[in-house]
Each structure stands twice: as structure tokens, then as C-alpha cells.
Image: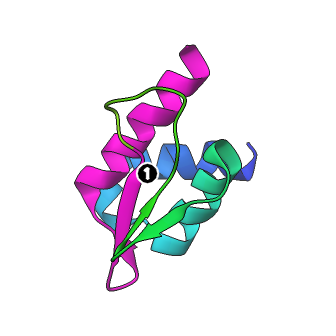
Amino acid sequence: MDGIEKMLRKAGENPANLRFAELRKRCEHFFWEPRQASSHLIFKTPWPADPRCQFQDRQGKAKPYQVRQILAAIDKLDNG
């Protein structure tokens, strides 16, 4: 299992325990470079609405609901 699959499995099992830096690295793999909007990182997606691909650092972790949104965006990207 490669690093991306491992992170996605880990995030799906426990979205409250995913490091911010790890999530950023994986989002950069799928969605390229983010733009910074105050405390959020925002990644451009090929669709105009939800699922959104943005998140913020909360004491070194990503917020669980934002992790779930990103997992949905990656799934949508993979499955068209």
C-alpha cells in the first residue's frame, strides 16, 4: 500500500487524528498548490461547488469535517 492509499484509509477511519501537514501534502498531490485565505488553505477543484477542498490548521491537526470534505473531493475526482 502506498503512502496516499495509507493516508486515505487512515483519514477515513479517524478524521479527527490526521496531521495538518500530512493532509496538505496529499491535497497538493491531487489538487496542486493551494492559495492562502486568512487561516484556510484552499485548493482549486475542477468543479464549481461542493465538495470543497479547503482546510485549516487546528493545533497541528485538520478539522474532522474538513477531512471528510476532502475525502469526498478526492473520491469525486477519482470516480468522475
Q: Residue 75 magenta-drawn?
A: yes
Q: Position of residue 39 (x, y in %)?
A: 33, 76
When asked about the image quadrant of residue 54, the answer is: bottom left
When asked about the image quadrant of residue 25, the answer is: bottom right
Give the amino acid at mark 1: Ala
Give the residue number, with chain letter if any, for mark 1.
11
Residue at the location (36% across, 41% down)?
A: 52
Q: Position of residue 10 (x, y in %)?
A: 48, 52
The quadrant of the picture occupied by the C terminus is top right
74 or 35, which is in the foreground?
35
Is residue 69 toward the left or the right of residue 71 in the image? left
In this view, which residue lies farthest toward the top? 80
Say if residue 24 shows up in the picture: yes
39 is higher (above) or lower (below) than 72: below
Q: Give the magenta-colored segment's residue range.
A: 53-80
Is residue 41 toward the left or the right of residue 80 in the image? left
Q: Residue 62 magenta-drawn?
A: yes
30 or 19, which is in the foreground?
30
Query: Neighbour class for label 1 at 10 Å: few (<14), some, many (≥20)?
Result: many
Residue at the location (33% across, 42% down)?
A: 69
SS of the residue under disc 1: helix
61 is higher (above) or lower (below) than 74: below
In this view, which residue lies farthest toward the right? 2
Is residue 58 toward the left or the right of residue 11 in the image? left
Residue at the location (56% across, 15% down)?
A: 79
By what rule are the colours in the image chosen? rainbow
Task: Tally the marks.
Answer: 1
79 is higher (above) or lower (below) than 52: above
The quadrant of the picture occupied by the N terminus is top right
Say if residue 14 shows up in the picture: no
Q: Position of residue 78 (x, y in %)?
A: 60, 23
